[in-house]
Amino acid sequence: MDTVDKIEEYLQSLEEYFFSSLSAATTDLPNIHEAVNRLWLDISRYGPGMPSFPEVHLPALGDFQVPPPPPLLPPVELSLVEKSVDWAKKHPWIIGSVAVGVVGTGLWAGYGTLRTRRKNHHRVKSQSNERRQVVVVLGGDAPPALPLILDLEAKGFIVIASVSTPEAVSALEQQSHGYVRALVLDPNEPATISVFLRSLASTLSRKFPLSSSGDPFASPASHPYIQSVICLLTLPTPTPSIHAPLEHISLRNTYLPFLSATHITPLQILQAMMPLLRTGPARARDKGKKSIIVCLPAIDAHVGLPFASMQAMSAAGTLRGIEVLRREINLASLTDQTESMKNIKVVVADVGLLDVGIYSSVRPQDNIYKPMEDWSTSEKLAYGPAFVSISHTTRPLPSRWGAFTAIFKNKGLYGVARAPSNTRIFVDNIISVVTGGRHNPYFFGLGTIIGQTKNWLRGERFSIGAGDEPPSDHL
């Protein structure tokens, strides 16, 4: 304890000595400041004078305006080539890698393609001739049917045509190149409908062409499918129908068989075709819409001429049934989830007079009176003069000069016949509907665009041939 007390006394004495020394040293500091001030006053009062300096006047700067910065130079627009070159200079390794990859991929793809082509040469050659689209022609022995069938075959379709007699089967198939199959369907015999449908189902499983060797039946993956149905059974046959007043026609014995052949039988076939048109491979939609084409006589479908009641009633009934079928398909396509109904198009073709080379060798005057042989006496007296006055026939004249000279010749002719249209027009219009206008891709595909436009403008009902426009109302 004595040691600690001694240390504290020593520090206290040291602190007192430090403060006393500092006070003694700083007592004269204010006197120094006063002495300096007094010296400066004495010099300025008693000393020599200071020289006078000239006054310097600086001009006023006035309002100072900061000049605007210079305008920025517009960026230089580089072209696509210059940008590509600039980017390539900045990324040489990427360019090199891409080039090596492209060259390697090209060499690998070329080698693989060449190897595949050599390996599958024969298989590809056989598949290139494979046809799967089928066009069913009802009434293959009708006058305009033969050029239509042969042209469909030339366009790459398989044609299944119905004929009324077994003799016509071989006659039709011999004129084809193996892609036409003729089946018997007599529209006057309803019993042949079921036979025709069974033969049609069997034909759809056959291999085409018919002359091919090996198994005659195709594999299920390559079965043909129906692309279009063309009905010619509703057109007038070469043998004229009965032209007589409605009073004379026997509805049970005469009209019912005619109605069955031209109205009931075609609609029965179309009923059986509808399930086949709804089904088919998925890639069939890439070939265009499937179609149902019904050909009707133009005048009978538009108006009913006197003494042609049978044809007019049958054509009107068929036309109305086809129109209802079209509306049903269009309505069902709005709610069909499979979209199969959207792929079916129903078209009516009003066919006028065509140049099919069939003209009667009997004189027109004899043809006028022959249908009147079975009329009763009262019917001849009542309807005979009117029937004769409108039933005159005139042969088509071979030239314009012949048409001009016929005006001055008195041969009992009441006028000059209207020239029939070329059958080629009928064939081109029907094939345009079947293919959707894509059957003639000439001039870098421009023909396809024109064909599709014409097909769209033509609509769901159009006319072909001479006399295809509807007569005036006063007739």
Image (cartoon, rainbow, N blue to C red):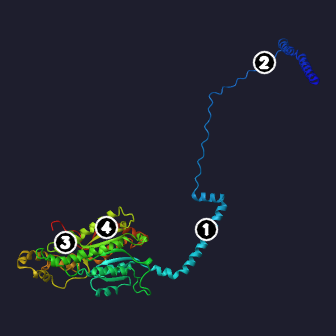
For residue 329, side relative to residue 391 (left or right): right
Q: Which residue is mark 2?
A: 52
| Separation of marks 4 and 1 at Cα, in angstroms | 50 Å
Give the secondary structure at mark 3. Answer: helix
Type of residue at label 4? Arg
Whichever of callouts 2 and 3 sits on the residue coming sooner in the sequence is 2
Q: Name the front one of labels 2 and 4.
A: 4
Q: Is residue 172 visible?
A: yes
Q: Name the front one of labels 3 and 1.
A: 3
Instruction: Say whether marks 3 and 4 touch (CB < 8 Å).
Output: no
Type of residue at label 2? Ser
Rendering coords of residue 441 (x, y %): 41, 72
Q: Which residue is mark 3?
A: 313
Q: Which residue is mark 1?
A: 102
Type of residue at label 1? Val
Quadrant in which the N terminus is drawn: top right
* Residue 458 circle label: 4
Instruction: Say whether marks 2 and 3 touch (CB < 8 Å).
Output: no
Type of residue at label 3? Met
| Separation of marks 3 and 1 at Cα, in angstroms | 71 Å
Whichever of callouts 4 and 1 sits on the residue coming sooner in the sequence is 1
Quadrant in which the C terminus is drawn: bottom left
